[in-house]
Structure formats: structure tokens, C-alpha cells
Image (cartoon, helix red, strand yellow):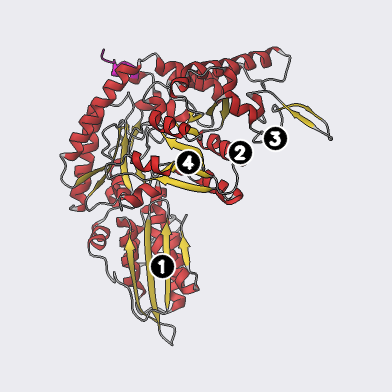
Amino acid sequence: MRDELYQQTILEHNRNPRNFKKLEGATHVAEGYNPLCGDHLWVYVKVNAGGIIEEAAFEGQGCAISKASASMMTASLKGKSVDQANELFEEFHKLVIGELKPDEHPNHLEKLAVFSGIWQYPARVKCASLGWHTMHGALQKEKSISTE
Amino acid sequence: MSLDIKKLRQDFPNLSINVRGKPLVYLDNAATTLKPRCVIDAMNAYYVTGVANVHRGVHYLSEQATAAFEFSRQVVRQFLHARRVEEIIFTKGATESINLLAQSYGRHFLKKGDEIIISYMEHHSNIVPWQMLCQQIGCVLKVIPINIQGEIIFEEYLKLLSDKTKIVSIVWVSNSLGTVNPVKAVIEAGHKQGAVVIIDASQAVTHMPIDVQELDCDFLVFSGHKAFGPTGVGVLYGKEKWLQAMPPYQGGGDMIKSVTFAETTYNVLPYKFEAGTPPIAEVIGLRSALEFFQTIGWEDMEEYKKELLDYGTKRLLSIDGVRIIGTAKDKTSIISFVVEGIHPHDLGTLVDQEGVAIRTGHHCTQPVMEFFKIPATARASMAFYNTKEELDILAKAIIRAKEIFNA
């Protein structure tokens, strides 16, 4: 049944989003906006000289799916290299469109696999991917990301 | 009075489906209405035994199709109480009708510095075409503000009016708030300043009888699919004197009298504005739709929908944390609301699991959302085939969503 979509992890991250703040000293920042539903967030990433993500954060407003997804993303990025972050972005993207089955395909998603059911809700895929697209854009130094 | 809702529902095959294992509760009528069987049958009959192009052939089928197509125009004329059938233009929807007006009337009659007045609660389709016109010719868009109930502030409208005002374009019934605007007074005041007044009747069309002569509006637009008809067809009503004076919107077949490479002369009304093969099946379907719901009776329909509105409003407000957006005194059966602690999109997904179809989002009225300082709302919009039981199911689904969210 559907409550698959709203699993406890997602509900919990929605209630208590991690790294929900403006990150001072961020090296990469991008704004993400989904005009369809009004989800609007900013993603901050702090990359050190060695190319490692020291910290990631986000702020803004959105539905539970977009908020939980961004929250879990910031938690999982910490300590990863930029290349690893980009790889994780690709994997997450494939996950939410149903192309990657966490049980069948090797991946680095770990807790993020909680979003594996979302491909069954095509209208909500963009909610889950907004934070990720924004992060990806930030690392590419794009200014504003829209998922519409 | 009293409508036989159970019997009426049988005319809508779509109402009998299950969604996610539960009977469909369709509360998204402001987005599009379901279609009665007679509409589906009429369109089907055209495709099964009546296919032909219109206004062209001398063969039997073409004559039949042309007659059916033109009879629809008569039905629309009667429906709107227009003076002449030439004043009824078929378009692909209200959006195209407004774009036609902006590009044909607007570009022809307006000049730099002229002003166009719309309201704060317009659908994007009655904002963007005017912004495009303003960019093209340098005219200026003015906006009538609204109050916290979601009603236009009439005195502010009067202040905006001046001899620079050339067009007033306003929605009759707001799709996101349910507000019924005092269009008669808006039209009168606009005319005093010499402006033409356009009425967007997209939502109004199923809520009240329309008499364009009594209203004295210059133009009126609506979409077929919000009036139990098919998608892909809409109507532009215009006073003949304006339509005569306006240049064509698009060029092509059907809108010409004769074409040479040196010169083309345009066809007469209404064909001047109907370039290309029109949506024939849809126009035929629209006629069935308008005939169908007029047989139900406006008064009974309105009384019943008012009951649904009152019941639904009370039922939703009985749930902790529910706030209704749009509380105008004069309101149709549209309830926009937010639930504390649950984003409208999450709510939409959760009530969908109970088979309930509501709209969530900004409803193509982003300025309204910005005014109420919310990103989106959930919206339940009722047609005459909805029931109080269905509103109970919605209420229960909201309560369940709140439990899941601990909201």
C-alpha cells in the first residue's frame, strides 16, 4: 500500500529536517524551485581544498517528500568527494524514476533507498529530486534550478 | 425540487470506477468536469458513422457534419443568450479565446500607454496574454486588489479606471477561491470609462445562467471541458461590432473568402476567426453537454450545490487545523483549504489513496497564493453529481492524513 511512500524515516525527516540552515562559508550555493507546487529551497555545500564535502545544508519550504529528501541528502553528502556526490546524484535519480532497484543493483544509497517506491507516484518524483538537482546544480555552479 | 442525484450519477460512466481499490470520489470539477454519456455518444457517433470535414464538401457526410457543427453554434448562442449566431466563435478553449482577444483586439485597438485592468484573482490565462501584449505594444497592466476574504475591492477598481483604460478583463468565478465577482457592476463602471469588458466565465458557466445581452459584456469566454463537454473546444462570444472591426487572429483555410498571391479577402463572421479545420467532434460534444445540464434546472442545481458547499465547509472546519482560503460572501461550490502541518501535495497524495481526487497546487493563480502567503492549497470543487457522503469520505481521508503526519 501507499503508506510505503510516507515511511517513518521520511515523516521524521520532514518533522526534524537535518542541516536545515543557511551554511556560512559555503563554497557552492544554488536555488531550486518547482513552480508546479511552489517547493522552493536553497542548497549549500562546503567543499574543502581536497575536494571533500565538509558540510551540506538546505533551507526553504516544500512538501514532506522534498523536505525529507533534501534533509537526507545533506546528511549523506557529508564526507563524500565531489565525484562521489555526483555519482550518488546519478544513483538517486535512477532510483526515483524506477530504473535502479536497490536490492538488485549495486549502489551507495543506503538509507536513501527509502525513496524506492516513489516512481509509482510520477507527480511526486520531482518533489524527491528537487534538492538533488539543486545540489548537483550548485556543484556545477548553476545559479537557479527548476524541476519544471 | 430535489434532484435525483443517484439517477443523474448514472449518466456519468466515469463515476462508477474504482481508484486504488475504492470508489472514485471526484472533487476536482473546477479543473475539469466528468462527461455524461450523451456527450461521449455524440462524439462517438461522429467518429463511427459521421466523419467529414465541415464547410467544404458537397457530399452527404460533409453536409451532415456541417449541419451538426452549425447547430452547436445555435445551441451555444441560445445558452449565452447572444443576439446573433455570428457572435459565437469556436476556439480550443478559454485560454485561446483570451489570447485571440489580446492579439486581435488588443494589438489593433490599443497603443503605447493605454491601460488594461485585470483582478488579483485571475487565472494565469487571463494574466499572461495581457503581459505579452504589454511587452509588444507598451501598454500597461493594472490589477484590482483583493481583500482577505478573497473578494475584489470595488472602490480600488473604480480608482484604477481612467480614460487610459481600454480593456477590463475579469474572471466571473474564481477557480482557486470560489468567489463570485460582481461582474455586472464591473461592466457598467468599465463602460462609463469607455473600456471594453471581457468576462472569463470558465467557472461560472456551470454555476449560473448566462445572458450576455443582459450583462452587456463586450466579450465572454469559456472552455467546454469545464461544462461537462470535451477538451479541445472553447467559446469566444463577442459583440458583433467588435468582431467585425477586429483583424483575424490566425490565417489559413476556412477564414478566407478568396486567396490570390496578390491579395486575400477574409471570410465573414464567425469564420473569420476559425482558421483551419475546427475540433468538429468536440463542438458536437459541447452541444450535448450544454443541452444535458440545462435540462437539470439551474435553480435545483444551485440550491443543491449550495447545500454541498455549506456542508463541506462545515465538515472541513470541524477538523482541527483546517483553514479555508476564500471566504467571500458570494461563493460557488469550490473550497480551497490548507491543513496545518501538512503540505497540500502530501495531502493530495494521501487522500488519493482513499480514492478521492482533489486538486493541490497554486491552481494557475500564483498571485492569489502569494497574497495569502501560502505556496499552495488543496481544493475540493463540487458538481451537481457530488454528494454529502463523498464530502464525508474526504473529511475522513484528511483526518487519516493528519494521523500519519501526527499533525
Q: Quadrant of residue B396?
A: top left
Mark 1 lies on a secondary structure that is loop
Choose mark 4 or mark 2, whichever is in front.
2
Disc 2 to disc 3, how far (Cα)?
19 Å
Disc 1 to disc 3, how far (Cα)?
56 Å
Image vertical order of residue B18 relative to residue B342, above or below: above
State yes or no: residue B3 in magenta: yes
Residue B356 in view (yes/no)? no
The mark that comes first in sequence, 4 or 3, is 4
Mark 2 lies on a secondary structure that is helix
Residue extent of the magenta highlight: B1-8
Which sits in the foreground, A93 or B119?
A: B119
Disc 2 to disc 1, how far (Cα)?
63 Å
Residue B126's disc is 4
Residue A107's disc is 1
Using the image, name the chain to which the residue with label 4 belongs: B
Which sits in the foreground, B151 or B47?
A: B151
- Residue type, numbered disc 2: Phe
Residue B304 in view (yes/no)? yes
